[in-house]
Amino acid sequence: MTQDTGPKTAQQVIRNLHNFNRKERDHLMKFALSENPSCPQISKELWRAIRPDGGKPQRPKPAHMFVGMDYHLNWLYAALVLSGRYEEGGIKKQPNKWPKHSQEKRDGAPIQGNQQDVDLLVAFPGKGKVLHLVLIEAKFDTGWSSKQFISKVQRLEAIKSLTDSYQDLDVQWKFMLASPSNSGPKGGAFASSSLGNLPGWISEGAGDEQAANHFRFGPSHAYLVKRSRKEGSTWEVMQTNLRGR
């Protein structure tokens, strides 16, 4: 087995992210909402939420970015470890194990059989050899799961620890939560005391002020359509407040 030499530039990673994206809903939404589905422009509101500290106020050009919904972590890993050699006809027998200098994840190899993903992934180049990766998890009406959050963070940290060793690329990671509430979750794995045990790039602040990065999106309420009895003989509509619990 011959290990691929890996990406050398931010633009190669962004190209890989485009190439590996096989999410039908993502492509369909871009087709429906953008005049240029292969290079959609992100909104000014999203850019304000994710813009790096001290970064340029202007949004990056769409052709230089990647934005994808429900992006699989398998695809993200592959995009961060492969050069463009696979574009010549694919690539076979890459070792499915964490490199020695990576933080090994005990319960799985880099490429797994599950469909674990991130709700929204945005990638764009910075100055010099910098590549910004912003990973966003969103909740609308359902609750935040501590178990799911911790599992995802562990796997992402293993991937990040691999990119931390790169000489040609400086990959800057940022993890964010998004919901209709004015602030993110504060309990369970999201409590300040729990966040202190997680990687620093997952949150902001320190001590009692430590909190997950969060921005607000969406309406404050919607209407729930549901059956009012188990047998489904009647149904009803109820207003519900959206908090991203």
Image (cartoon, grey):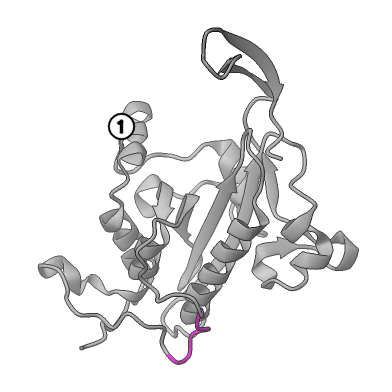
Q: Amino acid at mark 1?
A: Phe
Q: Provide residue 58's location: percent of width, then percent of height.
A: 54, 46
Q: Provide residue 225's location: percent of width, then percent of height.
A: 56, 16
* Label 1 sits on residue: 31
Q: Residue at x 87, y 68 (%)?
A: 207
Q: Nearer the viewer, residue 51 or 16?
A: 16
Q: Provide residue 22's location: percent of width, then percent of height.
A: 28, 49
Q: Residue at x 66, y 60 (%)?
A: 54
| Element assignment for label 1 | helix
Q: Is residue 63 above or below residue 102?
A: above
Q: Provide residue 92's location: percent of width, then percent of height.
A: 17, 76
Q: Residue at x 43, y 39 (%)?
A: 41
Q: What crowding class fits label 1: few (fewer than 14 Cα within 10 Å), some (14-19), or many (20 or more)?
A: some
Q: Nearer the viewer, residue 195 or 146?
A: 146
* Residue 29 image-quadrant placement: top left
Q: Is residue 224 visible?
A: yes
- Stretch in magenta: 100-105
- Is residue 61 found inside the magenta-colored segment of the image? no
197 lies left or right of 21: right
Taking the view exactly as shown, the residue that stands out farthest to the front is 231
Q: Is residue 98 above or below residue 62?
A: below
Q: Is residue 55 visible?
A: no
Q: Residue at x 37, y 83 (%)?
A: 97
Q: Is residue 207 above or below residue 178?
A: below
Q: Please identify the quadrant where the N terminus is shown.
A: bottom left
Taking the view exactly as shown, the residue that stands out farthest to the right is 208
Q: Nearer the viewer, residue 227 or 74?
A: 227
